[in-house]
Image (cartoon, rainbow, N blue to C red):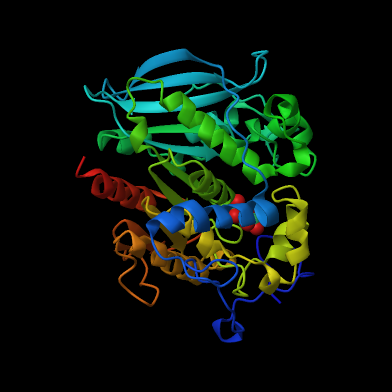
Amino acid sequence: LVQFNGFSQRIPSNIDEDQVPPFVLTHPLKYADGKKVKNIKEWENSRRPEILNLFKDHIYGEYPGASVIDFKVVKEDEVFAGKGKRKQVQIYLGKSKELFLNVLLYLPISKAPVPVFAGLNFCGNHCTTFDSLIFLNDNWIADNHKGVSNNTASDSSRGSQAHRWPYEEIISRGYGVATLYYGELEPDHPEGWKNGVRSLLKEELRIEPDKWAAIGAWAWGLSRVQDYLEIDKDVDAKRTIVQGHSRLGKAALWAASNDTRFAAVISNNSGEGGAALSKRWFGETIEHLNSYFPHWFVQKYNDYSGKAEELPIDQHLLLASIAPRPIYVTSASEDLWADPKGEFLALREAGKVYKLYKIAGLAIKEQPQVEMPVGKKIRYHMRKGKHDIQLYDWIQFLDFADYIFKEK
Ligand code: GCU
């Protein structure tokens, strides 16, 4: 038994490669009844919807449609000595206009509209930079973040996760970046749904709160950011890359899976319930997720605590459901909790669907060495070090974006 991230040892976890029992994965190109998927049309019209429905029923719940009716750029400033601009935008979610999301958007100065990386952040837009002109988030924020007490942010939390958001680097490469605090969609605790979109938009979205879950609510918020990007003339919204780290990487994958307006996706260290295989017993398990984060997934997911083998799907199918859009999965060498090898194997398996589209999968069978990115439109790397998102990762994401958009 091992202890990770301060979690108790009550639930067994394995980090010994030799102890991983054999496991069986369903083939992405075989229907639940065993029949083979013959071509792209069948994949798109039948097998992909079958997979999405299984993820809805067993793991993440429903993915409602839009409710947005209006947007407002509240503040716009020049940044980085005239090399870029920054917008602070409100996205109104309901008719009343009382409920809105605060989006922070950085853009390079450019004549042509630019592609944007869209992703959620962990502790408020003000945590992503030291710039004091960013509105301080006044929503519920977990106390374990710097400068937060009584679930309220203070000025000292500014910039606490700035290293994860190298804005200047990103805009200097010709890309924009949009971010939003995930807790605005649903505060991340078991009772959070009562103060989040699942409850507040219940009538408007015509969906009961227990028909979806927190990861679904966060993912849905990313789609609302895309709604805004589509009306911003500085943005080329046909080239949005949705990205996220860890639990927010799980949300980014689920968003890309449901919302095909996202041109590509990046999952950074998303681990169990994200890019990593659940049936491979290594690091975090479904039982850990359900015990520590019961609000992230639908009730049904509990049936698979300690019984991953009974799940009719595994996470390689979530990645496959994004095909043929480009996908980048990353791991970190010390992040065993997220099961780097399980993330790599899931991506490799997903390649079977990309192959239908004549898109090359990962060219190697074994997980590559640290900091040796592999693949092109399906790409993988393992950064050296801990569970995090760092400049090394972003530099690879920018290279990936250059590659996938190069023909256009
Ligand atoms: C915990 C959790 C992971 C999650 C991570 C994070 O470690 O067990 O599933 O990805 O938090 O969001 O940082």
The image shows a total of numbered marks equal to 0
Please name the residue shown 60% across and 65% down the image. Answer: 313
Residue 345, given in percent of the width and then of the height, sits at 46, 71
Q: Is residue 70 left or right of residue 2?
A: left
The image shows residue 358 at horizontal and vertical percentages of: 29, 61
Query: Which of the two residues, 135 or 317, is positioned nearer the viewer here?
Result: 317
Which residue is painted at 59% across and 50% down in the image? Answer: 247
The image quarter containing residue 362 is: bottom left
Task: Name which quarter of the figure residue 338 lies in.
Answer: bottom right
- The residue under the point 44% across, 64% down is 350
Q: Quadrant of ligand 1?
A: bottom right
Query: With 376 as the anchor, is 40 left or right in this view?
Result: right
On-image quarter of the C terminus: top left
Residue lying furthest bottom: 18
Q: Nearer the viewer, residue 193 or 64?
A: 64
Q: Seen in the image, is 294 located left or right of residue 313?
A: right
Q: Quadrant of residue 177?
A: top left
Q: Is residue 79 above or below residue 197?
A: above
Q: Residue at x 48, y 55 (%)?
A: 321
Figure check: 362 above or below 87: below
State the image coordinates of residue 131 (x, y, percent, origin top left): 45, 25
Instruction: Say whether residue 133 is visible.
Output: no
Q: Relative to 344, say whether 20 is above or below.
A: below
- Where is residue 191 drawn, in percent x and y? 80, 39
Question: Where is the N terminus found, in terms of image quarters?
Answer: bottom right
**Compared with residue 391, is residue 146 higher up or lower down, i.e. above or below?**
above
Q: Nearer the viewer, residue 141 or 297?
A: 297
- Would residue 76 be visible to someone looking at this image? yes
